Amino acid sequence: MLVIDNTLYGWLCVLILLITQLDQSLAFGASRVEAFKRRLRRQVAPSLLLDDYLGYDGMLDYMEQLAKAYSDRVALQDVGVTYEKRPLKSLTITNGDGRDGKKAILLIAGAHAREWLTPVAALYTLEQLVVRHEENAHLLHDYDWIVMPQVNPDGYMYSRNVDKLWRNTRSPNGFNCFGTNINRNYDIGWGQGYAELNDSCTMHYAGSKPFSEPETRAVRDKMLELVQSKRGMLFITLHSHHTSIFYPWVYKSDTSDNDNDLHDVAEAGAEAIFNATGTRFTYGQYGKEDTFGGTSLDYAYSIGFPLSYAFELSGERDGLTFDFWPPKNLLKDLADESWVGISAMAEKAIELQSPDRPITVAKNSSSSYSLANMMKIILLMTIITVLSR
């Protein structure tokens, strides 16, 4: 029978108590540090002003501020350059747990220059995911979000400053005609549908060839990156003002292989909006009514995004129709409505793609906890050594 000296035994008991107290203190300290960080972030969080439409520089400014203030879970990336040499950027949002290989949700806006509400809704989505992360943490638990709030800045700024109705990019087509409709420029049924797609002087022009536009290539490359890494799960492109949610196919009337899932996600978004605001959104496969090629939602679906949508934001309020340019006093209300739909679609998509989602523990534990665990191991080894003598 092993006999332990009373003095040694006493010291071992003291050490056990100290380690236990240290563990509790470090855990309490870590929680206080996290709380302090949250308070500090709230104080320095970039403010998204929704009392006016932002210029493109203002959008980039807001994205850069988010990336700087929340650098542990937000990454700003250069993804291309427009014809007029404006930078195209995406923002990747995570929950900061350090896990690689999560499935991803890709959201883009601004493809059609005159649809000014769409980048407002995309920026508001960023605010909800980043600044208001605690309320929306469930959307980032096992999924990353990649948001491109403005994919056609040349056309957008031309619409703001020169021709409000401008829809396309600003690349020259010859004969004093400019611009390509980048939602007809993807390599899926390209050029199919109606004659104007081949007319370089119309707002429907599909371009000289698939992916002729640097803006479209930037979105394509991000899509392919996510699909090739087996991460692409949900794609949403924001448009206005048809108050509808469309899914593939657009270039043909054939039903998609997972039509039920596509329908359920669209329905979830439409019902959530109606319940929250009373606005009725229609939803369904676009190609059942009309067909044309080159759209981003068809292309995303064709290369491997199992869920792909064009979300046409609202075009009216209180009986008033405002087409592409809602009054500034309605921007907050409409952006919030769009988020209701986007978040509901994401929730339904997550449910369909991960019906038995396990609770996952983050890899990157606090260094405080690691220190306590190391000391516990050292203590256990000491006890074993003493008892074995």
Image (cartoon, rainbow, N blue to C red):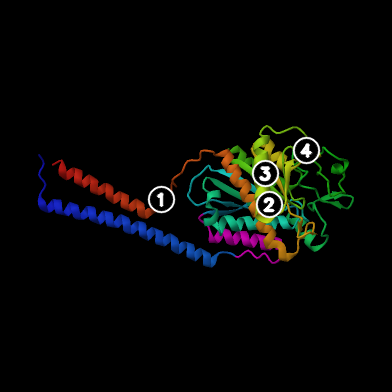
Which element carries disc 4, helix, strand or loop? helix
Amino acid bearing label 1: Ser
Q: Residue at x 10, y 49 (%)?
A: 5
- Tell me where residue 266 appears, x and y as whole percent: 67, 44
Tell me which corner region of the image, top left, top right, bottom left or bottom right, holds residue 295: top right
Q: Residue at x 58, y 44 (%)?
A: 104
Q: Earlier in the sequence, mark 1 or mark 2?
A: 2
Which residue ends up furthest to the right in the rendered image?
A: 175
- Tell me where residue 144 appears, x and y as whole percent: 56, 47
| Residue at image mark 3 | 267
Marks 1 and 3, Cα distance to the nearest angstrom? 39 Å
Q: Earlier in the sequence, mark 4 or mark 3?
A: 3
Residue mark closest to the camera, 4 vs 2: 2
| Residue at image mark 2 | 274
Marks 1 and 2, Cα distance to the nearest angstrom? 41 Å
Q: Residue at x 36, y 55 (%)?
A: 368
| Residue at image mark 4 | 287
Tell me, for residue 9, which label it has, or none. none
Amino acid bearing label 3: Glu
Instruction: Specify start and end residues of the magenta stretch as a single range.
Output: 47-72
Q: Are marks 1 and 3 in contact (CB under 8 Å)?
A: no
Q: Considering the image in quadrants, where does the C terminus appear?
A: top left
Q: Residue at x 69, y 44 (%)?
A: 309
Q: Earlier in the sequence, mark 1 or mark 3?
A: 3
The residue carrying pointer 1 sits among few (fewer than 14), some (14 to 19) or many (20 or more) residues within 10 Å by Cα, namely few
